[in-house]
Amino acid sequence: MKASFDEDFDVIVIGAGHAGCEAASAAARMGCHTALVTISLDMIGQMSCNPAVGGIAKGHLVREIDALGGIMGRVIDRTGIQFRLLNRSRGPAVQAPRAQADRALYRTEMRHVLEYTSNLNLRQGVVTDFVIEKGHVEGIELQDTRRLKAKAVILAAGTFLNGLIHNGRSTYTAGRAGEPASIELAESLKRLGFPVGRLKTGTPPRLDGRTIDWEAFEAQPADERPVPFSFLTESIEQPQVSCHIGYTNQEVHKLIQDNLHESPLYSGQIKGIGPRYCPSIEDKVVKFPEKTRHQLFLEPEGYDTYEVYLNGFSTSLPFELQQELVHEIRGLEETKLIRPGYAIEYDFVDPRELKHFLQTTRVQGLFFAGQINGTTGYEEAACQGLLAGINAALYIQGREGFTLRREESYIGVLIDDLITQGVDEPYRMFTSRAENRLSLRFDTSDARLSPYGKNLGLIEDTEWAKFSARRDRIARLRNILLETRFKRSDPEYQELARILQKDLGDSISLASISQLHEVDIPLIFNLLPSSFRSQTKLSDLETSIGDIIYHGYIRAQHQNNERISTQGDVQIPSDLQFNVVSGLSHEMVERLERIRPQTFAQASRIPGMTPGALTTLLFFLKSSKN
Amino acid sequence: MSDTIVALSTPPGRSGIGVIRISGESALLLTCSLLNDPNFSPEPNRVILKAIYDPDTREVIDRALVTFFHAPHSYTGEDVIELSCHGSPQLLLRVLDSLLFFGARTAEPGEFTMRAVANGRLSLTQAEAVRDLIEAQTHAAVRQAARQLGGELSARLQPVKDSLLDIIVPLESSLEFVEDDLPEDIVRNISEKLSSLSAKLDELANSFRRGRLLKEGLRVALVGRPNVGKSSIFNSLLSSDRSIVTEIPGTTRDTISEVVNLEGIPVLITDTAGVRSSADVIEQLGIERTRRAVADADLIVAVIDGSQPFTEEDKKIVSEASESYSVVALNKSDLESFRIHNAQQLAQDLILIPVSAKTGDGLTTLCAEIIKPFSANYLDENSFVITNARHFDLLRRASDSLESAGELIRGGLSEEIILAKLYESLRFLGEITGETTPEAILSQIFSSFCIGK
């Protein structure tokens, strides 16, 4: 074993998936000499599962990543082939963008963005071990005997750690289909004493689009006005395509029931826990036997390929059976499978090992991001990568770590949940996980987070100018909405009263009109003073109206939360022995010791904490403070 | 020497004024901390207006009247501080919490009185009354307390919480899983369901009044115009001769209170001065106290002389009493001229009980009528009661949130806003039963609906 290093970096990121790309990009742009090491340079930014970004809560995460200066939103805006804003009929707090991606274009674009980032170096190789000196990370070792030095290392290994693919009764080690797993690295984590568990996820078969009877499916077109992910994107230029919706049927279900013994999920072959919100078709059929059909989406993989992703049909049944099942589906009678679906089990590390900066408590300078922390999803991975990259840079520069609060972001909710609660199945973001859902709209991510991005140096001056301009435009619009009033004698008033079929009082402000649920955005737009209409963007108007409609509810919610939040900031000393707090039961002490919360708010979120125990703890903290 | 104890001395629940009593060696010291005034050394028995500070934020949370009673010249015989604060339950709780934080201990039921006895401040006769009171409290209230400790409130709230989750889950699913193939009719009749839930919570919350009575005792005021026999009835109820009974109208110039034990519930009976217009200053003072006693009472016994035609004053008294929970005692049933049917013109739906203070006729019925809605049997058979002011407050808030959610639904607002109110309600309930985590809601979604593209 040679003692010297081949290359010397500030930050090394292991893995070039969605977490790794964000991490490397952020660290490099914050001035760190950064290396991004991956098993295959051709698979940078690969979407292992469905070719899509965003959705409810996930779209919120991408907007937040973008607002902080991350890259995912920009890349999908250039490579998305079907944009849709979900939940359009509901309030803006639960709307979110989603886009199908051209899988290959996304990879190319991501690699392009990284290659044009200064301080950022791509390296291909299989990482086998960490170099650790006196509890500090010093670098990494590669399979080909290269040694790379670093002050901080971010591990973003995805499903590669001890990855084991199941297809029927056959299993083989792999990180993704066709790519080798990271076995030695997984072993080295165990050697370091990290508590490692197993999770499972799965993916459906891919179809030959030329053999699909498209007439049998319902087309789902893209939005006419695509809503981009990045605040910097003016408009989506690339042509938009449709997805198609179809259904399974009883014949499919029966065939699955009859062959359950072939499924590694039901034969006991798979030990890892899979996500309940992304069940395999076997699970759907077994758990909901009363359902006569399950919805399927045919998603195009890209412009220049006939490969089609059969979303909703994730399975680990044997290949021949998958082919047989697909033939039972209406419209797919003649369809050939290009790639079979499969299940994959992989190692993850209990995220309660981490501090809020995503740094491990066991090894100084070692950060974890993405699926290794028990999450699932590209967006969940990417936001952790971004935060890990930022914090690795801050760590090296001797600056204070960066965290986001639950109250201000989904990213804050995600990291706080991971670190205080741990996971027992792959963690996915949902809007209902956020206590302050109404305040965390996708279209206010910039207002909430971009100032942080600017301070961190991830938002450039030209981008900041755009941010400021939008902020000012929205403030101005808000004032116009509040100040513009219509009297009974105004023609606009009469027209409005006629459309809505109700009395609007002696006069009504545009702000009040926009709170009426019968009123839509174009109508408000037309009621704006004509001098403003030409210079007003619809998206700005939507944001300012969103601010107005939720204002009262957010204030009421805030008042109710006040008691909790004022106490929530009470710090818990990191060296506090909870057993010295008199009045805490043994069980409560155990829970607190396991999680080791840093603030009272975190303690209050530990499952099973009783109000009595919390009060006891609060009194202790306050009296010891004095 | 004993430690310093603190408790709310006025009944829990919303009221004009809430009195917090602190007794023990460090009473004054604790008060200094609470008032954020280390040099506070009040003259005994003088009322001083002072600001109370939150120990944490140092902000003023209330302005209270502070009275210092120097040992041994106090109720307990120890140094006592009484704080008359504004009567909001949350505020009082905050002041109490602060005092606990500074080192006081919550007084056990009856502990102030026990200390008074121990320090020789109460006579033997008075002590007997106290013992009765405490025993009465333990008799019926202990069972109630044991029930709450055993988690019965929590158990009773569970079905309400489950029904609330049954509303939240489909609403949340329809928002969160918009791309999934959910049944179309999952969100239905929510408005009706919410009304019924909020009614259930109100019912529980409203039992607080009865719960409080169990714990604190029932306050009964005897009212009526002079010389109708209030004091005679009072004395008969007490079987003692405490009130001076004379033929001169207006003899009872002050209010006199005694505690009797009726079926295990402590009942504080107050004999009031006769209500009538009077120029006599002392009597005026007594009448003022009467009005206060009436305002404080849980139940009013309007005493009417049934042997005489009803006067305008009688009608006024009965109509005022009927605004509270009340019983009409038609006295002097022993006299020839007594006519019960005359009383019907006073009020249609009042409970009329003919009594004779002189012979004792009808008094048992009167007692039974006073105690009826609060008696142990009634409570056992009919309902569970809330005795904790905090629980009462949380139930009311939970119910209010459900009601506003219902209004939002009828106003056609979007699900995320309605859900914000439903979660608010769930959080209030959670402070009693334990929190419902987002994880628990998600679990229910996944077990109810087939989610997953």
Image (cartoon, coloured by chain):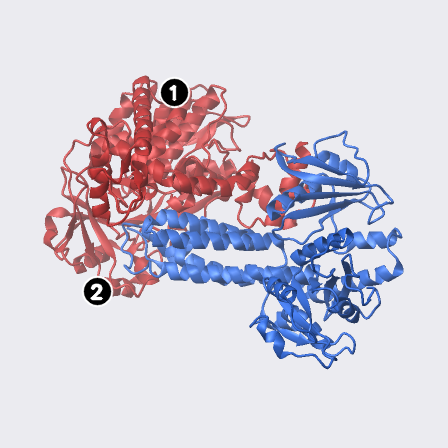
Which residue is depicted at the point 40% across and 27% down?
A: A389
In the picture, measured across the screen, residue B298 lies left or right of residue B174, that is: right
| Residue at mark 1 to residue at mark 2: CA–CA distance | 57 Å
Q: Position of residue A460 (x, y in %)?
A: 33, 19
SS class, disc 2: helix
Instruction: Report the front residue among A104 and A355.
Output: A355
Q: Residues within 10 Å of mark 1 (few under 14, many from 20)?
A: some
Category of crowding for the residue at label 2, using alpha-carbon neighbours closer than 10 angstroms: few (below 14), some (14–19), many (at least 20)? some
Q: Tell me the mark number nearer the camera, choosing from 1 and 2.
A: 1
Amino acid carrying mark 1 in the image: Gly
- The residue under label 2 is A251
Q: Quadrant of the N terminus of chain B?
A: top right
Left or right: where A329 falls relative to A259:
left
Q: Which residue is mark 1?
A: A457
Give the chain coloured blue.
B
Q: Tell me the chain of label 1.
A: A
Residue at image position (46%, 33%) is A358
Q: Secondary structure at mark 1?
A: loop
Q: Quadrant of residue B181?
A: bottom left
Q: Position of residue A185 (x, y in %)?
A: 42, 35
Amino acid at dot 2: Glu
Report the residue that reaches farthest toward the bottom: B336
- The reply to whether the C-beta atoms of the residues labelled 1 and 2 are less than 8 Å apart is no
Q: Position of residue B351 (x, y in %)?
A: 61, 73
Residue located 49% across and 39% down the image:
A419
Give the camera-side residue of A93 and A399: A93
Q: Nearer the viewer, residue A264 or B425?
A: B425
Q: Earlier in the sequence, mark 1 or mark 2?
A: 2
Instruction: Kindly indicate which chain is depicted in red in the rendered structure.
Output: A
